[in-house]
Image (tube, grey):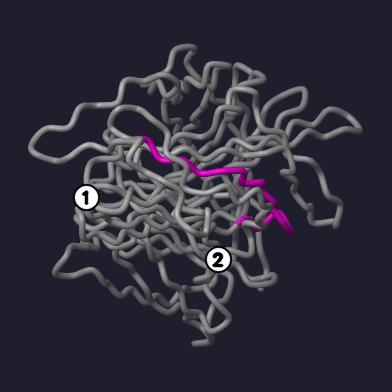
Amino acid sequence: MSKKLLRGSLALSLPVLGLWACKLEGMMLPAVTGSAATVDAGALRPASDGGALAPDAGGPRSGALSVSLVDAPAGRYLEVNVDVQRIELASEQGAWLPVSAPQKVFDLLQLQHGASAELGALALLPGRYPMLRLVLGDRNTVKLADGTVQPLRVPSGMQSGLKLLVNLVVTDADKLDLVLDFDAADSIHLIRTGMNDRYTLRPVLRAVLKQASGQIHGHLTASDTAQPLAGATVTAQGLDSAGQPVVVRRVQSAADGSYRLDLLPLGQTYAVVVRAAEGAAAYEIQHSGELALDLAHPDALFDAALGPLAATGGLRGTVTPLAGEGDSDTCALTQEEAGRRYLVASDVTMQDAVESFRFPGLPAGAYSVWCERRTQSGAGDEVVSRSMPAAAAVTVNDE
């Protein structure tokens, strides 16, 4: 199969001021309404194994929370090793309750295809717990495709921990499983500095309550051979408040072409988007349309047969102004069909004298590109800025 290389380029400018911001360090935790009880941190004592907290004997009955870690694919790396020091949960009064202190390095790329790492467990008095904090150590590394290992630097603004809004409401009979979905592919940022490339870890992760989640699964084949497609990138996508697609979960298809997008919060509508390349062959991009998951229908099926592409091309561009020490930039490539936008690919920018992004292996068509910058201050505040979408096209030259 012959391929024609198609090229396009563009430049995007990020605004100086963010479109929205959330203040994490020192933020006021929202008050609970209704009759839910609050947590009295003084009524908690270490459990016998030293790894959890339990109510004093004779006190109120408790619920139970367990925390585990999974990862999305990160194809450009062989290992992504993250040093998890401790996990803490915030009470309504703002006190941090220790869940566990693993003090262990986890290779995120081993936590895929149903694998997970248990981080700890906690017995909780009934009440509302709005936030979780993940504190990382300094033993973070990344193993590159050539086998070399590089340190992963954690910005100074994260030394107090990465905070996630979880809004857990616990009753005396609840047994809750909270899963931290770490997206390594979008969490590692490279700054080229001559002989000493610098890799920075800016974690992109979300917390999902397993009991309130569903799944989309299916099987992928090549339409010309009917053979399974392994290693395809499969994403479940929602829409943000601006109507732009966002990836909720990302996996790769197995050797038999099967995939399973689990940990999808119920009560939402998703679209599945599939991109595949196998050896020298490339395939068309397919999407499912709208798939709703709820309590009555927590499971959905989407099978796809992808046609081969005779020609592929690419888009590349630059971002200005150049990212600073506390910045991390990610660019997104989208397409629109029947009034609905789909995210085709995302790329963490690479920085040297200029800051650039690249999207290879694209079929001919019209696209939009926008970039997002996350800026974290030394106090732990985060501001997110987004560029205006820029139109771009890949066209086939038949000459």
Q: Which residue is drawn at 62% across and 43% down?
A: 85
Residue under circle 2? Answer: 112
Q: Position of residue 214 (x, y in %)?
A: 29, 65
Tell me: residue 10, above or below residue 99. above
Label 1 secondary element: loop
**As displayed, is residue 267 above or below residue 390?**
below
Amino acid of disc 1: Pro
Q: Which of 158 and 58 is in front in this view?
A: 58
* Measured Cα–Cα span from mark 2 to mark 1: 38 Å
Q: Which residues are the magenta region?
A: 74-90
Query: Looking at numbered disc 2 in the image, what kind of residue is underneath it?
Result: Gln
Q: Does the magenta stretch include residue 129?
A: no
The residue carrying pointer 2 sits among few (fewer than 14), some (14 to 19) or many (20 or more) residues within 10 Å by Cα, namely some
Badge 1 local density, few (<14 within 10 Å), some, or many (20+)? few
- Residue found 26% across the figure and 72% down from its top: 299
Q: Which residue is drawn at 24% across and 59% down?
A: 174
Q: Is residue 339 left or right of residue 147?
A: left
